[in-house]
């Protein structure tokens, strides 16, 4: 079962969320360095992420989630 705002209700869920976000940020930084690109946060509201998707010109690398509605805007 899932619960809205569980990360602020349960300490263990909040901790897991923080660890996941930190790890995600680290992995994105590694990908940016490896591919010499700026991906941004990966969130659809991030202008850097949208700019990166636009530069792909409809052909996205494997690390871009193809089922993402935001990607559909750039296909």
Image: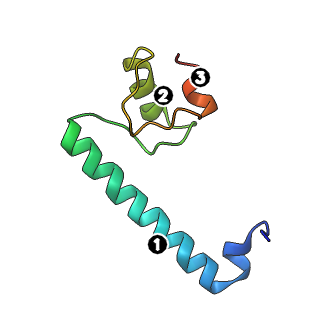
Residue 4, given in percent of the width and then of the height, sits at 78, 66
Q: How busy is the neighbourhood of tag 1: few (under 14 within 10 Å), some, or many (20 plus)? A: few
Discs 3, 2 touching: Cβ within 8 Å: no
Q: How busy is the neighbourhood of tag 2: few (under 14 within 10 Å), some, or many (20 plus)? A: many
Residue marked by disc 1: 19
The Cα atoms of the two marked residues, 2 and 1, are separated by 25 Å
Q: Which label was assigned to residue 72?
A: 3
Q: Residue at x 35, y 49 (%)?
A: 28
Residue marked by disc 2: 50
- Report the side of 31 relative to 4 (left or right): left
Local secondary structure at mark 1: helix
- Report the side of 44 relative to 7 (left or right): left
Residue 66, given in percent of the width and then of the height, sits at 52, 32
Residue 58, quarter of picture: top left
Residue 59, given in percent of the width and then of the height, sits at 40, 19
Residue 56, given in percent of the width and then of the height, sits at 38, 20
Local secondary structure at mark 3: helix
Discs 2, 1 touching: Cβ within 8 Å: no
Q: Earlier in the sequence, mark 2 or mark 1?
A: 1
Local secondary structure at mark 2: helix
Q: Earlier in the sequence, mark 1 or mark 3?
A: 1
The Cα atoms of the two marked residues, 3 and 2, are separated by 12 Å
């Amino acid at each position: 079962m899932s619960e809205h705002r569980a990360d602020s209700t349960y300490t263990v869920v909040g901790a897991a969320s923080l660890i996941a976000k930190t790890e995600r940020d680290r992995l994105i930084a590694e990908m940016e360095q490896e591919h010499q690109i700026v991906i941004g946060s990966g969130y659809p509201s991030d202008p850097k992420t949208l700019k990166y998707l636009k530069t792909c010109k409809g052909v996205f690398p494997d690390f871009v989630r193809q089922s993402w509605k935001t990607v559909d805007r750039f296909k």
